[in-house]
Amino acid sequence: MTPQSRLRLGAALTAAAAALLVAGQLPALAVDDPPAPVTGNATHFDGLGSPYGGCGLPQSELDSPDFVALNVYDLPGDYTSYPVRPLPPDQANRIGLWNNGLNCGRFVRVTIGDRCTGTNDGAPGQPFCRNGSWVADGYNGATLTMVVADSCGDGNAWCRDDRNHLDLSTASLNRFARGGVPVGDLYPSHWNNRQVSWSFVPAPDYSGDLRIAFLRGAQRYWPAIAVSHLPNGIHGVEYLADGVWRAATMNSDMGQSYVLGATTTAGGVDFQIRVRDVTGALVGGGRVYRFALPASCGGTCSAAYTPVSYTTSDGPTAPPTASPSPTASPSPTASPSPSGSGCAAAWTVTGAWAGGFQAEVTVRNTGTSAATGWRSEVAFPGGQRLVNAWNAGATQSGARVTATNAAWNGALPAGGTTSWGLVVSGDNQPPTEVSCTLR
């Protein structure tokens, strides 16, 4: 298998690895961002492995259908296997822009560059585009904003010799756009290995709040969580224990997954966390997220990804925001439910492509009492059609989609938040209505 067309093997934890994480592990080391923009070789791969990509999330839970992998290593000319990840401090000079997982969940703005007319097969010890040259064509300048979701640690020249190499999701290649119009036929006929220029950018058109879920095997003695829907990446999770904020251990180098301190209680609000972004700042100005191990886990979570609802405190009540990407589709202002219902819903576009888009609806209990269930409605402005949904049961009648809570996320305490997602075919236009009611 080469990075040109493959499915990643995915991330998994052995019992020994889990024990190592609980015992404590060397911290990840920070690598400075490259000056923007940088140019590198681009390859492509078919999808994240199962159950998780390198960041600790299933592909279905990414903030965008367009995703990339960054290089684990910065090792020109060295194609040796280094099985220990994250790389320890004595190997800091080998750390690539994967940054021991610290660049997970960040977005990159990618621009298509020149095409190789020769051989660019990533063969160890061989130059890129040998017996040919780099030429510009009509695809140069097409752009796409993508999320960092995986790592490239293969022993080939792309993943080792080229520090600025990007491995792009194959399905995204024809969604690169010029002047707002997708190129449509870049892949496969006009690919033949490209150079790209790219830089890190804030999450496009950010709104809403974090998503938190427990991973497979999580339990109160080994609480492994995934944190997603980030305003500006993630550089740490802290949990409250005995009145003191303590740094959680990153789950190997899966940079959006952390292992919290064990809890001895079986119910109620077991965990309180806060999250630091790529700048080291606390997300939401220090917002604290409170949640428990879901009853659906039955003591141990068997599903690969079990989302949880949470309550927030000790931070601003408004969600954090970030500057929109130049091509991001605007999200409408959150539409409250009818007066007195105690529920507010917000719409966020998390990814868009030719002929469709992906969105998330956040449901918040704004009342003073707990709810046992909720219903959310979205009205489309045109001929958009619901393709699928998650974290809710959803149906469409005419232009209106109606969603009801899943079994695990119906209970919402006062101030509690949950979300459901959907993939839609048709033009990416703001809905005319986004609302919710509680039961």
Image: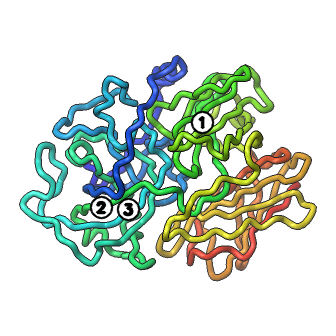
**Percent position of residue 337, x then y:** 84, 65
Residue at 90 percent of width and 60 percent of height: 341
Q: Residue at x 31, y 27 (%)?
A: 91
Secondary structure beneath dot 2 equals strand
Q: Amino acid at mark 3?
A: Val
User: Cα distance, mark 2 to mark 3?
Assistant: 7 Å
Task: Write down the quadrant of residue 392 in the picture.
Answer: bottom right
Q: Residue at x 55, y 68 (%)?
A: 357
Q: Is residue 260 left or right of residue 293?
A: left
* Closer to the camera in the image, 296 or 125: 125
- The residue indicated by pointer 2 is 196
Residue 281 in picture, x, y percent from top left: 58, 42
Q: Nearer the viewer, mark 1 or mark 3?
A: 3
Residue type indicated by callout 1:
Ile
Q: Which mark is residue 110?
A: 3
Residue 83, image x, y percentages: 32, 28
Between disc 1 and disc 2, whose residue precedes?
2
Q: Earlier in the sequence, mark 2 or mark 3?
A: 3
Q: Earlier in the sequence, mark 1 or mark 3?
A: 3
Residue 50 appears in the rendering: no
Question: Does the CB distance between marks 2 and 3 fall below 8 Å?
Answer: yes
**Within-10-Å neighbours for mark 1: few <14, some 14–19, many 20+:** many
Q: Relative to the observer, which residue lies in front, 35 or 236?
A: 35
181 in relation to 388, above or below: below
The Cα–Cα distance between marks 1 and 2, rounded to whole angstroms, is: 34 Å
Between disc 1 and disc 2, the foreground one is 2
Q: Label 1 vs label 3: CA separation?
A: 29 Å
Q: Which residue is mark 1?
A: 225
Amino acid tagged 2: Val
